[in-house]
Image: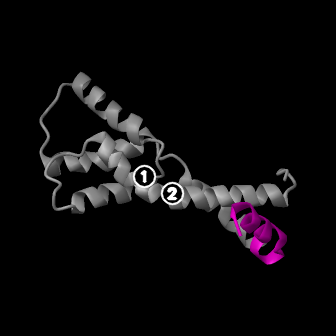
Amino acid sequence: MGFEDDCRAVAEDRTALAELRIVAPLLMASASPCGARAVVAALVPLTSLYGIQTRSEAEWKTFWKFYIDALEALPLEALKRGIADYVGDAKSEFFPKPGPLKALCEAHASGPRMAASRAKFTLEIADGRSHG
């Protein structure tokens, strides 16, 4: 069975569909973008750990913009887990660069995104909004 077949099977199972309607909002929330504030809040503790230099207000604004642009679309849990992976890596000696950190975080984003996508599609089928 494929993605669509799996979703149709759940949409046709009254018990499974009722349970999905309960958890779907949680699945959607777990996959939603974390936003700029969450990115900064998650990374600020690393500034003391990795000892980055003091900057002017304008430099900090530019510094954080790179991280926000790279990471704000990630689910919060994926961001946290990617940061934890970075900190736990024996080779991590410096503050992470946005691109490599994003790659670590993306590895944790696919699960929540797929679950939310399946839930959304299944509910669309059940509610007659999907054609196919």
| Dot 2 amino acid type | Ser
Say above or below: 97 vs 49.
above
Give the residue drawn at x 51%, y 46%: 33
Report if residue 48 is visible in the image. yes
Say above or below: 58 vs 93.
above
Q: Quadrant of residue 12?
A: bottom right
Closer to the camera in the image, 59 or 95: 95
Q: Residue furthest bottom?
A: 15
Question: What residue did someone put label 2 on?
Answer: 110
Closer to the camera in the image, 58 or 8: 8
Decide if residue 112 is on the left or right side of residue 121. left
Magenta segment includes 116: no
| Mark carried by residue 106 | 1
Q: Residue furthest front?
A: 1
Say above or below: 94 vs 70.
below
Give the residue drawn at x 79%, y 65%: 8
Give the residue drawn at x 43%, y 59%: 108
Decide if residue 28 is on the left or right side of residue 91. right
Label 1 crowd (10 A; few <14 / some 14-19 / many >=20) = some
* On-image quarter of the N terminus: bottom right
Q: Are marks 2 and 1 in contact (CB under 8 Å)?
A: yes
x, y percent for residue 62: 29, 26
Decide if residue 31 is on the left or right side of residue 98. right
Give the residue drawn at x 16%, y 62%: 90
x, y percent for residue 9: 78, 70
Magenta segment includes 11: yes
Measured in 3D between alpha carbons, the distance from the residue under mark 2 to the one under mark 1, in whole angstroms, is: 7 Å
Q: Which residues are magenta?
A: 1-17
